[in-house]
Amino acid sequence: MPATTTRRAAKNALFDGFGRIAAALGSGRRAEIVELLAQGERSVEQIADQIEQSVANTSHHLRTLARAGLVASRRQGTHVHYRLASDKVLEVWLAIRELADEQLDDLDALADAYLGDRTHIDDIDRDELLVRLQRGDLVLIDVRPAGEYAAGHLPGAISVPPDDVDRMLEELPEDREIIAYCRGPYCVYADDAIRKLTAHGRQARRLRDGIPEWRQRGGPIETGAA
């Protein structure tokens, strides 16, 4: 009996260890942080601004993720910068999101409430985009914030941050289709850009997923500011 009890305690501890990963991701804000860091490294202040939380609350979430080994940090002067600890963290996050998409009956309604009506927004998948990029018969725009573009973007993409879409309309060629992409399938920046472009008579579609999925599947990435 003592040996059996000891083994049960050891097994409990082992599975509690597994559970720490799930618990660390068991918050919408922490899941949002993981998706944000999939775009590139961020300071605590930048993360807090993006997820619209206080620096104190954001730091608490980051410490939880760090204790689970999901994020790593470095200090630069008075600022602490965070990044995903490994590519495995991204794989886990994408798997969770895919599972939610398959299993949660209300996910479409939740997405529609945030993203708006997507009925008239056409998309393009990765394989078709690769072919079109080789042909050079489209304009590819990255509609994420400029810092995310600099951290990594698709080859040949033009940086058009969310607030610059209206200004860039006159500069984008009118005789080629425009493909917009952002952080992923649930990122609103690309949807908003497509709505503005099509409202001005442009032919435009969005990439079905985003930079993290592109990188995970071995797609080429360029770095550097626009």
Image (cartoon, helix red, strand yellow):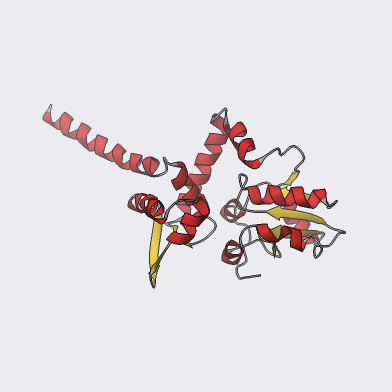
The quadrant of the rendering that contains the C terminus is: bottom right
| Furthest residue in direction front, as rendered | 54
| Tag count | 0
On screen, residue 37 versus residue 189, left or right, reads left
| x, y percent for residue 73 | 39, 62
Quarter the N terminus occupies? top left
Is residue 79 visible in the rendered structure shown here?
A: yes
- Residue 101, picture quadrant: top right
- Residue 205 visible in the picture: no
Q: Is residue 70 left or right of residue 52?
A: left
Q: Kindly identify the residue that appears in the image at 64 percent across and 42 percent down.
A: 115
Farthest bottom residue in view: 77
Residue 53 located left or right of residue 180: left
Q: Residue placed farthest to the left in the image?
A: 2
Front-most of residues 157 and 47: 47
Taking 83 as reference, is 108 above or below it?
above
26 to 161, vertically: above or below: above
Percent x, y for residue 180?
71, 54
Residue at position x 11%, y 30% in the image: 2
- Horizontal arrangement in the rendering, residue 5 relative to residue 159 (left or right): left
Q: In front here: 85 or 145?
A: 145
User: From this viewpoint, which residue is outermost toward the right?
Assistant: 175
x and y percentages locating residue 159 in the rendered image: 68, 64
Residue at horizontal 35 percent and vertical 49 percent from the top: 64
